[in-house]
Image (cartoon, rainbow, N blue to C red):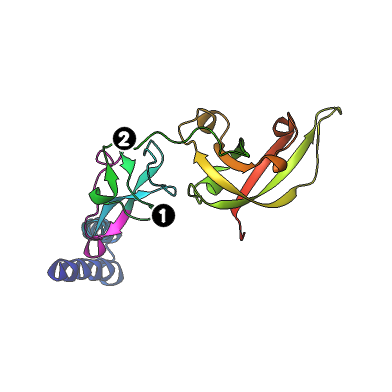
Amino acid sequence: MKVLKTILAFVLVAAFVSVGVWGYPRVAARLTWVAVTAMNLVSNEAFTSIAVAAVNLSPGMQIGRGMVVMRRWRRDQVPEGAMFNLEGVRGKFAREKITKGQHISPQQVTDVVPPPMRTTPRRGYSILSFAVPPVDAARLFVGDRVDITIQFVDRSQTPIVIKNPVTLKVGWLVHYINYADPMRERMGYIPVYLEMRNQELWPPGTARLVTGNRMFKSER
């Protein structure tokens, strides 16, 4: 590698000399192109790509399209157990919490289907779905407590009126994040299901009057 870089440096020097001394711009341009191309090859040899989480992955979550990506990584800094393709990750289930941007290893995923998720709320609780921007959903784990910023829509008026945002310091529990919902492709939002006490439940139909939901981890 060092020898190759030395040779490339010599080629670049030769290119400059060709222009400055002999005045051969075409020769210099050709030598420069060769040197730059070779340098790019050297640079590419120093890097590879590994699989990393594109969103926070909760235990038991099935890893689908868009939930993992390949990221460029220095070869001399590749973490032990890193995976070099997505085929060994997609369709599997996370065995533990994997944070967005973290590399994924075979020990962190499994083919074993986890027990069915609890679909009914606990006694005295209810579950509501909120459409959340992908950037917010990607930062959440199932089990997190979140606050929510919402905008109410008044459809009784023409044109429709969107009221000022209101932040609710509620600390509701993230029950489920549905990355497989078609809404993700169609509307650009991720459905996030929150569990809340019945006394905190909004009146029927209120959810349809809300838009622009943002979610943040709660301090509660």
Q: Along the horizontal axis of the image, is 31 left or right of 114?
A: left
Q: Which mark is residue 99?
A: 1
Residue 54 colored in magenta in the image? no
**Residue at 40% in and 54% down:** 101
User: Dividing the picture into quarters, in which one does residue 205 lie?
Assistant: top right
Across and down, in percent, residue 193 comes to 56, 38
Q: Main secondary structure of the magenta part?
A: loop
Instruction: Please say whether residue 48 is visible from this viewpoint.
Output: yes
Span highlighted in magenta in the image = 72-89
Instruction: Please say whether residue 83 is visible from this viewpoint.
Output: no
Say which element carries label 2.
loop
Q: Which mark is residue 113?
A: 2
Q: Is residue 201 above or below residue 44?
A: above
User: Dot 2: within a 10 Å radius of its alpha carbon, few (fewer than 14), some, or many (20 or more) residues?
Assistant: few
Q: Amino acid at mark 2?
A: Val
Across and down, in percent, residue 128 comes to 62, 36
108 and 159: which is toward the camera: 108
Q: Which residue appears farthest toward the left when viewing the image?
A: 3
Q: Amino acid at mark 1?
A: Thr
Pick the quarter of the image with the C terminus. Answer: bottom right
